[in-house]
Amino acid sequence: MELVHRDGLARIGKFKTKHGVIETPTVLPVINPNKITITPEEMKSLGAQGIITNSYIIRRTDALREKALKDGVHSLVSFDGPIMTDSGTFQSYVYGDMEYDNRGIVDFQRKIGSDIITILDIFSKPDDTYGMARDAVDETYSRMREIEVGDGEIIAGPVQGSVYQDLREKAARLMSSSDAGYLPVGGVVPLLESYQYDKLVDIVLTARMNSDFSKPIHLFGGGHPMFLAISVLLGVDFFDSASYVKYARDGRMLYPDGTRDLVKLRTLPRWSPIYGKYTVKELLDAESEERTAALSRHNLAAIFMEINEIKERIFQNNLWQYAESRARSHPYLYRAFRRILERNGDLVGFEPLYRKASFHYYDSYSNSHPTLKRLSEFTERFLTENRKETVILPFGSRNPGKRDYGIIRDIYEKYDMNLLVPWCNTYVPIELEDTYPIEQIISSDITDERLHRNELLKVEKIIGKGWVFEKKEMKDHSDITEKSRNFNLEKIRAVADLQFGHSVGKALFPDGCRIITSRATGRLRNILLNDQILATMRAQDGFFTLTVAGAERIRDAVEYPGLRVSVTDDSAEYNSKGFNVFFKFITEYDRGIVASNETIVVDSKDNVVAVGRASVSGREIGDYRSGVAVKTHHSIKSIKDPSEE
Ligand code: GUN
């Protein structure tokens, strides 16, 4: 799997098969080789890049088997793109019989030329006992192990484990460590059918977090458009869908936000490929086969329209907002979304440092967004390390980001105390006023009194109740001429602490460094020490871009391998000229690297050769084998000044 774009756990990737490259996320429509309603070629024109069919059905049916063995599965279904074949596990779960064994089934899929071959896994139901589910995980793993995977062959090793998180984790780890190159999450159809999306959140997230990130995750049976955005947000790359035709047979139509009955419809939507070809009445009066085909077309179009939008949102860096809006289309989806919020602690590790899209704040639930969770953890630590008089500025007295360098700055410099700004029902240190997401926010300004009070109590608990002042009358300070500190210096140190870790700020920016502000905007711009630029504060997100000189100061202050990737010496030579760092040349790295944050590139002796931006988090770096890990922007042999970026 090669990464193209990433937004948290969601990603656009490229997955290579023998019959072509698939760009994910995508849905593989299910083809029943006995009854092809829509040809795969037509599916392609509706957006499908590959299809999935069932090797068990092909093998059981004499005519299909003979043709598939003779001409191959691609010829059987008349499709020259990537074909995944399933093994019959699901049929054995539904009908209870299975006359073939694992090796035989895999071998058959090989003989018919399948691009993605599925082993015969053991389907665990959500209501299976723990013991049953555990045995199924173990047995599925040993079936994976008994398959010898050939060069270039892709074997799907399903992750089972029912609703037991520790078993899902175990299954994900075992399958990742095996030769399976593709990881479907199995046993979830009963949950999808009963709308238990919240349980799916746990299952998918646990599977994704504990799997090898270079291997795609597939959600077996999860092709309904309404659940796609949430699933992709949690890291699903592939889906399959038989629903497009099953629903069509029942006169049901898929929409991005749910399902509608043809009989209850007034008009067809304009985006549908059957709009203008039929009226609702004509469809109702049509022969059932014609109606099924038309509705199947519509349903596939709905699926791929949603996939298209999801990909666009990944690219725009605002899939979260999209999933949040989708979550409002059904109470069960909303329940799932709330479950995602509860698991924000797991998501923080994959959260990028900043996004190019502004942050949408709706109400107190937005405070659980992983970005705000990270910020609130920072604030807690900031206060713990600065336990002194703390003044909470009146709401609106100073909008973070608004440059009223007047009385407040004056007070800040004369009195050594914390100034906190009320922001989104919580409090943030004033030093972070320009930094993402504090300034880059679009807020409803909806106040939640309870949350606000709780946040205040949290501050009081850290600082000590008598030391926190709300709406404090500022003493007359005009007689004080001594400044105890410099606002800009404290500000750049606080931002550096947030960006690089606590106490890095002081090491990176010592007393005596020079801060240059933009003449046009008054914003902080370059930070210099002895006429050398250490870092540049970016106008758009308020974080720093480092130079090699800045990176060296961090390297000296942070224990190896903190904030860095160590590369082979050949790669170091190449990166020192300004070329990007590829995953495959990284020898050691910090597991705490934050995606899109500045990352220091060092050689085997910890010499800084370059600095750049991490394309993924430290949790993922070790898994990828192809693609760019760090996009370098400054290096020891480059001549370009990074402040000119
Ligand atoms: N189709 C739907 N669910 C499953 C599953 O758990 N395993 C396999 N192999 N196919 C499926």
Image (cartoon, helix red, strand yellow):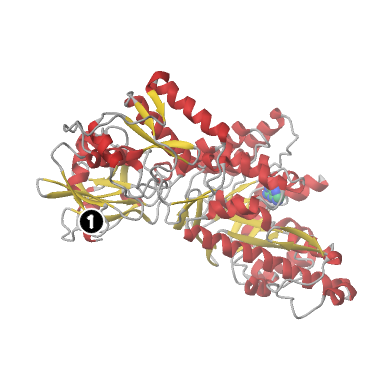
Q: Is residue 396 above or below residue 391?
A: below
Q: Is residue 552 left or right of residue 41?
A: left
Looking at the picture, how far across and down is residue 488, in whole percent?
24, 42
Judge by depth and name the residue closer to the eye, 58 or 339: 339
In this rendering, is residue 50 above or below 553? below
- In this rendering, does residue 246 appear at all? yes
**Residue found at x 38% / y 57%:** 627
From this viewpoint, is residue 98 visible? Answer: no
Residue bearing the label numbered 1:
518
Residue 349's quadrant in the figure? Answer: top left
Q: Quadrant of residue 635?
A: bottom left
Quadrant in which the C terminus appears = bottom left
Residue nearest the observer in this picture, 237 or 462: 462
- Identity, as a three-letter code, of the amino acid under mark 1: Ser
* x and y percentages locating residue 536 in the rendered image: 24, 51
Number of marks = 1
Residue at x-position 33% and y-position 24%: 389
The crowding category of the residue bearing disc 1, from other C-alpha atoms within 10 Å (few below 14, some 14 to 19, many at least 20), is few
Residue, x 82% and y 47% (percent of image)?
A: 95
Could you tell whether 534 is left or right of 284 in the image? left
The residue positioned 61% from the left and 33% from the top of the image is 165
- Identify whether 269 is placed above or below 495: below
Percent across and percent down for residue 183 are 57, 48
The percent position of residue 303, horizontal first and vertical second, equals 66, 63
